Image (cartoon, helix red, strand yellow):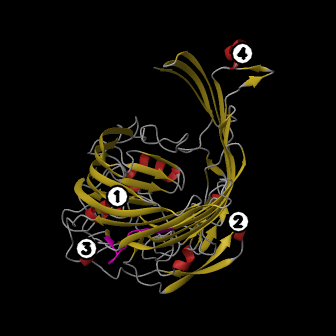
Amino acid sequence: GVQSQAVVSRGIASFGDDLVSIDTLNLRLSTTFTPNILNEGRFQYSRDLEQQIAQPAAPGEPTTANGFSPSVSIGAGGITFGKPNFLDRNAYPDEKRWQYADTVTWSKGRHTMKFGGDFNHVSDLLDNLFQNAGAYSYSNIVEFLSDYANPSLRRYTSFGQNFGPTAFKFSTRDYNLFFQDDIRVDNRLTLNFGLRYEYQQMPEPQIPNALESRTNNFPSDKNNFGPRVGFALDATGDGKNVFRAGYGIYYGRIINSTISNAITNTGAAGAQKSTGNLTPASSSAPNYPNVLSSLPTAGGNSGAIVVFKDGMQNPLIHQMDAIYERLIGKNTVVSVSGLMSFGRYLPTFVDTNLNPPNSTTTYTFVGGPFDAQTITVPKFTGARPNANFTSITEVRDTISSEYYGLVLQLNRRLTNGIQFQSSYTYSSTVDNGQGSQTFSTVNVPLNPFDYSLERGNSSLDIPHRFIASVVYAPRTVFGLGRDSRVGRAIFGGWTISPIVGIQSGRPFSYGVSGNVSGGTTGGILGAGGANRLPNTKINSLRLPYGANVDLRISRRFKFTETMNFEILAEGFNIFNRLNVTNVGSTAYTISGTNLNFAPNAATFGIPSEAGNSIIRERQIQLAARFQF
């Protein structure tokens, strides 16, 4: 199934089937030219075919001409059924990769130099048309049941459907070169210097639109030089006190899913197009459960498009760290580390086809944490400035982030049957609206003309995190050691390995549902951006902290030097602790100029999810392994 959470709010026939086929060939050739010159060449061919296919409609779900039931979502955070709006994904992607890398290592005196490069060619076929079976949205179950019983009523909130070709193919090429020199100044000091160059060659636009020049221009960022510098110092010369520090600039890619959206969504003939959100009052809107046979031409525009900002840069990260390590016992080290990471030119998505806000709306809070207070916010009204399109989503490089971390560690390598690793991290992460998402969305910021509203805690901010793991292989218990026959029979081959993790909950914002009256598009400002309250800082709330204990117990029976048998028992979240991974975040609902808390009083801040792909309910698995 496509849905992998422990509990999902989808109909039983709306999970979708997930299929993955991966083939990989790796070749490596290591060559010794001279005693101090080595070469390593690596080649990879791989294919990753991922498919997600919709299931047949469940009994009672009415189907349309395409044989599926349209998607239906009921209420904010409610239930969804029918054909999922993101399926079918017949190839998502069908990706083929040819990559060659070569590295030369040259040792000369105090220098160990490495230089080389790699070439990475990726061909992507994506076969997917969003909302191809239509998607209805209802505010509550009563409205849906009314349409189900009498479709002519049109009680839904909005309807959307996409049209156009399903499949597009394109390629990217990455060229990378590097040089590195490690200088052993003496037995106590080593210096590291390096430089790396990266260039991502984008594909050519396939279906540009003459009405918008940006649909015919993809980025070509050729100035990506990343210097690296570092050192390691044995302060006392006995290996017990070591200082390390490093700094480097690292570059990311403009990901292929974003490129795909800019190729397919240009509004030109042959592009994928959307109806947008049609209301029941629209002359072209269908009656449930019907869908449209062709794209309506009302308004005479080319629909929503995606373009790249002129001169867009690849993401850039400054990373710095400084570490002090102290040997406090045999194979036991304590360390303190300071970490900094500054992100620049990170991507976001902004609807540029909006006029600046030209009026305001004053809302009154009714109930909840802001009861009786008022806020006055900007309002986006009027027609789109470029009447040829609805939204024009520009992929921008305007997001910046800052991370500061302090890490304390206590680690011990396996000695006398025990090994442990433990760390505590205190950190702070802020940004101005980092989304960290695949593909694109129409508009990320609350107000595209005021980015100061996006500055605050990052959605990735986890201030406190403690992790500890132990590997214990008993050598003696109650005076019986493994060196004796009785000791070996009882304690030989046992290993006990617990892992404990405790961390702060992730942040979230005060959410708001509904749309301002008379706005250019939806949302509290009429800009179609983030659905949060403008009078509060972004990510000013936080989920409860999480704690998890995993445990592995195994015993190995040794038959010969080259043959053994192992049995294992592994438990995840062994105390079955309820770790909240999501809560109801919608605090207020727009009703005219009121913001009402009452519809959300029973759900706001209340846990709505207690499991994801990482944190789950208690799970136990047993295994046996024969090695020879």
User: Which is more foreground, mark 1 or mark 2?
Assistant: 1
For residue 368, the mark is 2
- Most foreground residue, 196 or 91: 196
Query: Is the residue marked by circle 3 packed among few (<14), some (14-19), or many (20+) residues within 10 Å?
Result: some
Between discs 1 and 3, the one toward the N terminus:
3
Q: Which residue is mark 1?
A: 257
The amino acid at mark 1 is Ser
The amino acid at mark 3 is Asn
For residue 335, the mark is none
- Residue pushed farthest right? 478
Between discs 3 and 4, the one toward the N terminus:
3
User: Which is more foreground, mark 4 or mark 2?
Assistant: 4
Q: CA distance from mark 4 to mark 2?
A: 70 Å
Is residue 312 magenta-colored?
yes
Badge 1 marks a residue whose secondary structure is helix
Q: Is residue 124 above or below residue 472?
A: below
User: Which is more foreground, mark 2 or mark 3?
Assistant: 3
Badge 2 marks a residue whose secondary structure is helix
Numbered range of the magenta stretch? 307-318
For residue 217, the mark is 3
For residue 484, the mark is 4
Q: CA distance from mark 1 to mark 3?
A: 17 Å
